[in-house]
């Protein structure tokens, strides 16, 4: 925090949206850096994760193998039974592993899903290859994302449409958006209410849950509560500047593309939805 102040990114007058965005970015970087330095990563224990190849038959064979092992410890007469049960259990376990791996390699339809499952250890609905406007599959992930964004937010300058119904719908949406923006500006507090104080910010922060889902900056409520003394003055300055300028910082509103579950064809752009994340 002190380094950001010394660099002129915090503790300066916030007179325009550019300085507000700079202060918000510096505040998030300082909090996230302190959080990473003070909080060690927790390693996931491998034994807590269930393996996909385990079956009820393996459980029964494991019980029989352990029972035979206990008998052999008591008496050498059960050596043959122990060897037989151990061989049966190990053979069944190798067969189950091989069958599960073959099913995993041959049953995956999404090109990015297989790698994601191996790296993350869980399933997902990643953005797959999609079809472009010309009907050709796009194999480049970055180009797929760019095509989705163009579909969600078409460029008005490049958009040529002769359909009167589509043009009327676009005009209606733009008119409603303009009315909503004007309503939001009129709903801002009057100047007579005065600026937000650090006491009000403290009260709002401590009323929130400490482990609720974070926003795009990944800062949870517990982190804000721990560093409230250092953060409150800068956060109050940003909040008051946003109120005075009628501006919401860009880094606090992020869009993300997500695949809709249960769709049969993920090459179509309508199989995805756009999520708007607000901090």
Image: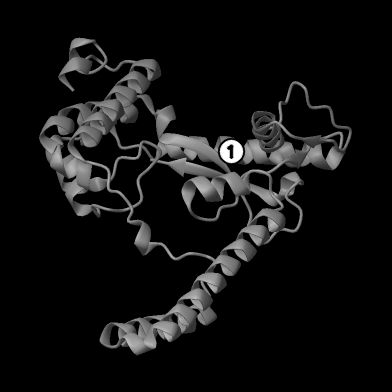
User: Is residue 258 in view?
Assistant: no
Which residue, given by chain and number where applicable, does mark 1 sit on? 177
Furthest residue toward right: 162
Return the x and y of residue 124 as percentages of the image width and height. Answer: 56, 53
Q: Residue at x 36, y 86 (%)?
A: 67
Residue 45: quarter of image: bottom left
Return the x and y of residue 35 as percentages of the image width and height. Answer: 23, 36
Tell me the quarter of the image containing the N terminus: top left
Depth check: give the residue in front, 92 or 232: 92
Return the x and y of residue 162 as percentages of the image width and height. Answer: 89, 33
Instruction: State how the image is colored.
Output: one colour
Left or right placement of residue 43 versus residue 94 in this view? left
Depth check: give the residue in front, 12 or 227: 227
Total marks shown come to 1
Residue 115: quarter of image: top right
Q: Residue at x 68, y 37 (%)?
A: 148
Left or right placement of residue 163 versus residue 202 in this view? right
Furthest residue toward front: 77
Left or right placement of residue 239 versus residue 178 in this view? left
Asked if residue 69 is positioned above or below residue 100 in the image, the reply reads below
Q: Residue at x 16, y 47 (%)?
A: 203
Q: Residue at x 30, y 49 (%)?
A: 43
Depth check: give the residue in front, 274 or 71: 71
Q: Which secondary structure lies at badge 1?
A: helix
Mark 1, residues whose alpha carbon is within 10 Å: few (<14), some, or many (≥20)?
few
User: Is residue 156 in view?
Assistant: yes
Tell me the quarter of the image containing the C terminus: top left
Return the x and y of residue 270 as percentages of the image width and height. Answer: 73, 48
């Amino acid at each position: 925090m002190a380094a950001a102040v010394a660099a002129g990114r915090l503790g300066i007058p916030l007179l325009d949206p550019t300085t507000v965005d700079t202060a918000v970015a510096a505040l998030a970087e300082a909090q996230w850096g302190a959080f990473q330095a003070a909080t060690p990563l927790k390693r996931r224990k491998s034994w807590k994760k269930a393996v996909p190849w385990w079956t009820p038959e393996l459980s029964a064979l494991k019980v029989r193998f352990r029972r035979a092992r206990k008998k052999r410890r008591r008496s050498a007469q059960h050596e043959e039974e122990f060897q037989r049960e151990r061989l049966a259990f190990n053979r069944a376990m190798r067969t189950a592993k091989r069958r599960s791996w073959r099913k995993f390699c041959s049953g995956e339809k999404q090109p990015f899903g297989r790698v994601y499952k191996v790296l993350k250890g869980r399933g997902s609905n990643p953005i797959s290859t999609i079809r472009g406007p010309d009907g050709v599959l796009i194999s480049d992930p970055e180009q797929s994302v760019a095509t989705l964004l163009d579909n969600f937010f078409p460029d008005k300058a490049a958009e040529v449409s002769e359909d009167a119904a589509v043009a009327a719908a676009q005009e209606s949406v733009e008119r409603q958006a303009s009315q909503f923006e004007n309503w939001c500006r009129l709903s801002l507090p009057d100047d007579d209410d005065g600026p937000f104080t650090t006491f009000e910010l403290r009260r709002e922060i401590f009323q929130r849950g400490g482990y609720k889902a974070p926003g795009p900056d990944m800062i949870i409520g517990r982190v804000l509560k721990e560093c409230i003394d250092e953060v409150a003055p800068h956060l109050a300055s940003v909040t008051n500047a946003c109120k005075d300028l009628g501006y919401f910082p860009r880094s606090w509103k992020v869009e993300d593309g997500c695949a809709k579950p249960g769709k049969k064809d993920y090459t179509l752009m309508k199989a995805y939805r756009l999520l708007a994340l607000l901090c």
